[in-house]
Amino acid sequence: MMGFKDFRCARIILSGIEVMHMIRKGQMKNDGDDRTAAAQFYSLVT
């Protein structure tokens, strides 16, 4: 692996990975919202 070019990029990428892990574990469930993990992630991005 070539590594990250700067600290900002590393922080952004690792934050996204952590969010995906939280969604997969079910730690980011909304009240009665039955969206898929991909739909939850896309709603955070937009």
Image (tube, rainbow, N blue to C red):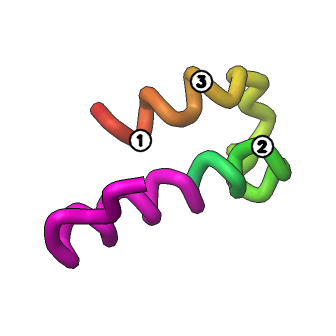
Estimate the x, y position of residue 19 in percent, counting from the top left: 56, 55
Count of numbered circles on the image: 3
Asked if the magenta segment contains residue 33, the reply would be no
Mark nearer the N terminus (1 vs 2): 2
Of the pair 26 and 14, the residue shown nearer to us: 14
The answer to the question of whether label 3 and label 1 lie on touching residues, with beta carbons closer than 8 A, is: no
Q: Name the residue tied to disc 2.
A: 24
| Three-letter residue code for mark 3 | Ala
Say left or right for 7 vs 19: left
Asked if the magenta segment contains residue 4, the reply would be yes
Estimate the x, y position of residue 6 in percent, counting from the top left: 15, 72
| Three-letter residue code for mark 2 | Arg
Mark nearer the N terminus (2 vs 3): 2
Disc 3 to disc 1, C-alpha distance: 10 Å
Q: Which of marks 1 and 2 is in front?
A: 2
Disc 2 to disc 3, C-alpha distance: 10 Å
Which segment did they paint magenta?
A: 1-18
**Which residue occupies 44% across, 63% down?**
15
Q: Name the residue tied to disc 3.
A: 38
Q: In which quarter of the image is residue 38?
A: top right
Say left or right for 40 vs 43: right
Estimate the x, y position of residue 37 in percent, counting from the top left: 68, 30
Estimate the x, y position of residue 45 in percent, counting from the top left: 34, 37
The answer to the question of whether label 2 and label 3 lie on touching residues, with beta carbons closer than 8 A, is: no
Under circle 3, the secondary element is: helix
**Which residue occupies 77% across, 24% down?**
34
Disc 1 to disc 2, C-alpha distance: 14 Å
| Three-letter residue code for mark 1 | Leu
Q: Which residue in the rendered view is the most extreme toward the right?
A: 25
The quadrant of the picture occupied by the C terminus is: top left
Q: Please rate how many residues cluster around mark 3, counting C-alpha atoms within 10 Å: few if below 14, some from 14 to 19, many from 20.
A: few
